[in-house]
Image (tube, helix red, strand yellow):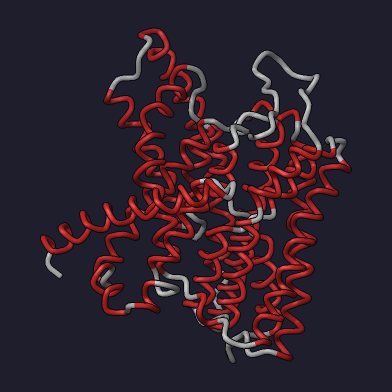
Amino acid sequence: MSGHQLAVQLLFQIALILAACRITGLVARYFGQPQVVAEMIAGVLLGPSLLGALSPDLAMRLFPPDSMKVLYPIAQFGLATYMFVVGLEFRVDIVGRKLHSAAVVSAAGMVAPFIFGAGLAVYFFHHAPFFSERTTLPQAAVFLGASMCITAFPMLARILVHKKLTGTTMGTVSLGAGALDDVAAWCLLALVLAAFDGDFSHAFQSIGGGVAYVATVLLVIRPLVARWARGTETRGELSDSEFGIYLILMALGAWFTDLIGLHAVFGAFVMGSAMPRGMVAKALVERIQPFTVAVLLPFFFTYSGLNTRIGLLNSVELWLAVGLVLIAAIAGKGGACWLAARATGMSNSEALGIGTLMNARGLMELIIINIGLQRGIITPSLFAVLVIMAVVTTLMASPVFDWVMRKYPPVTEPEGDSEDVTIHAPY
């Protein structure tokens, strides 16, 4: 396709994707699901799982292979921009007070599902055609363990915004633990890919580069922009040039973490969390969030759905494997995070809410298993099993969370300053 043809195709795809997301959102809202889940489902419906199966020719005309090369960067930019906004709203003060809780929840949310996933990998390795011939047992165990550890970090952030919980203890501990878990999972993936390729330099690059990036942002960039923001606060407005510079920082952060093998979402999120609070953060959110949420972000969820093939689950054995994976995923992630939060002194309502939110895998899971499939670590059969696990754990997050809030009404925390937020039931 020529450049002009791609541009015309893109304009039509924008209209189609946004319309599909809005229509699906109306149905999802009836079942108590947030818009983010509707966007994931819309992508699956527009992809090979439904439209591609019913009318392959129509699906090919609507989303030709050349156009996917254009949709992908838009999807990544929308995701990075949204995570920058999430970072801007991230309550670092609550993380400081609840650091112990976030660390314990994160550790539980890594160790338990990793053990369950590695155990399943040992069983699958000997009894099911789920791994390629090149994949060794240790590689299979680490990959499936990392896949079970992942949290739907962008989706978790979107659900928290939908439930108005971004500034609460529950929301902040969930985001903090989710971020730590996903970074650890990506580091594990880097180790698997390094072992698979026989080159561990990439793993060292990802882990070492990530640590260096966080240190640079927090110790160098954060103080500089805080000093620069004083002039903005004095004038009482954020200029267009200043707005552009903040976006440049966001893009550079996302670019660097993607370059070193971590996902772009972490670079954007860390950069957002380091931006000055007060008028600057408020102005950035007001400018970025509406367009990002309404237009850009749906491309990420739709793009991932367009690459999902649920029809690969075509035997009883595969569905039994789905059941095993689901049980291990829910018990290992949701159950472990609930127990860990309770062990740190959090209320049962908060602990159950955190466990429910952390259990969602979403499209971060789809990203990591797509990498495994593309690199030849797993087979399409295991890919389909893990897709179902990701979809089910994500679909159950919002209704189960609402039920928990009704069953165990949360209370206002007695600690904190005037910025503390009461956790309200989301209905």
Left or right: where does residue 248 sit relative to residue 222? left
Left or right: where does residue 8 sit relative to residue 119? left
For image coordinates 53% across by 59% down, the residue present is: 363
**Placement of the C terminus among the 4 image quadrants:** top right
**Placement of the N terminus among the 4 image quadrants:** bottom left
For image coordinates 85% across by 49% down, the residue present is: 339
For image coordinates 55% across by 70% down, the residue present is: 369
Q: Residue furthest top?
A: 234
Total number of numbered discs in the rendering: 0
Q: In x, y percent, where is residue 348?
A: 84, 39
Residue 282 lies, with reference to residue 399, above or below; the image says above
Residue 336 lies in quadrant: bottom right
Residue toward you, 35 or 381: 35
Q: In x, y percent, where is residue 391?
A: 58, 63
Residue 226 lies, with reference to residue 215, above or below; the image says above
Residue 280 lies in quadrant: top left
Residue toward you, 255 or 39: 39
Q: In x, y percent, where is residue 381?
A: 57, 83
For image coordinates 11% across by 60% down, the residue present is: 4
Residue 79 lies, with reference to residue 305, above or below; the image says above
Q: In x, y percent, where is residue 396?
A: 66, 55
Left or right: where does residue 88 sit relative to residue 292? right
Residue 158 lies, with reference to residue 188, above or below; the image says above
Residue 332 lies in quadrant: bottom right
